[in-house]
Amino acid sequence: MATGTLGTYSPSQSLERRHQQQKRTDFQEVDWARSDGRNFHQCRPAFLRTGAASSASGSAYAEFGSTKVIVSVFGPRESKKAMLYSDVGRLNCHVTYTTFSTPIRGQGFEHKEYSSMLHKALEGAIMLETFPKTTVDIFALVLESGGGDLPVIISCASLAIADAGIMMYDLVSAVSLSCFGKNMVIDPTSEEEACQDGSLMITYMPSRNEVTQFTLTGEWPTARINEAMELCLDACSKLADILRSCLKDNASELTA
């Protein structure tokens, strides 16, 4: 009986580079169209709900296009480490990707950079002094990575914290934007992120008009940065309204 041959194959690196370069060139054209039909300044439809994990103190699920995230919050609960932090609580953040979150299947992994950025985005919004010597643990799990993962994680985590009843100064919403030559596209997909010349992300508390985190990559003229910030801040304010509506709908369901 004939036996089969097991092997792996992939395009040569030079071919992949040419393909990426062609995409980058296409994205820099004035009249190119986004693959999902959105215009340059249009965000993906957002689906949000709370109470996604019954075992957690609070939780939320977010779906922005093909990006899907679930966040669970545990605490405040006593912690020996928190005893070192005088009169304020301690916040721990963990961002993990599932084995099936990306097109290339493999082992799940913790994204330490995203974990750190999630912490920075949220710590200024949480009233840490209201739970001294205790710890709040936030676990974000990316079920599917479709682009703009970190902004979705941050927004979903903010919703989960509110669902847990933890006091906050305001909800935190996050939006990112990619730059392609003269073009700027908001809420990019993973395909767009792979070819971007630069990126910008803002996390924002609309009620306080306060930015909790601002990240910028690539080279940007000052005028372009200002335009990009205005677009992201406007989108953040509208996303925050959706987050609040989600919380109100959940409260209505509980009291019904």
Image: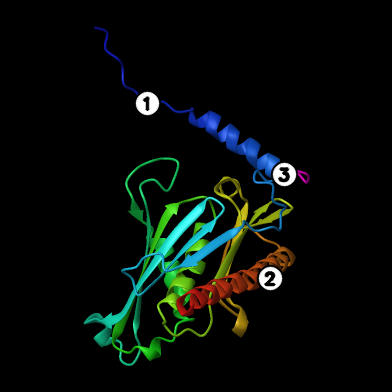
Determine the residue located farthest toward the right in the rendered image: 31
**Total residue callouts:** 3
Q: Which amino acid does label 2 sit on?
A: Asp
Name the residue carrying label 2.
Answer: 234
Q: Do the residues labelled 3 and 1 touch (CB within 8 Å)?
A: no
Whether the magenta-drawn stretch holds residue 36 is answered as no
Mark 3 surroundings within 10 Å by alpha-carbon count, few (fewer than 14), some (14 through 19), many (20 or more): few
Rendering coords of residue 246 (x, y %): 54, 71
Rendering coords of residue 224 (x, y %): 72, 63
Who is closer to the viewer here, 238 or 10?
238
Name the residue carrying label 3.
Answer: 33
Q: What residue type is labelled 1?
A: Thr
Which mark identifies residue 8?
A: 1
Q: In this view, does 72 lie to the left or right of 232?
A: left
* Disc 2 secondary structure class: helix
Looking at marks 3 and 1 on the same chain, the residue that comes earlier in the sequence is marked by 1
Cα gap from disc 2 to disc 1, whole angstroms:
47 Å
Q: What residue type is labelled 3?
A: Ala
- Residue numbers of the magenta segment: 28-32
The residue depicted at 38 percent of the width and 41 percent of the height is: 105
The residue depicted at 44 percent of the width and 45 percent of the height is: 102
| In the rendered image, the vertical position of residue 108 relative to residue 82, given as above or below | above
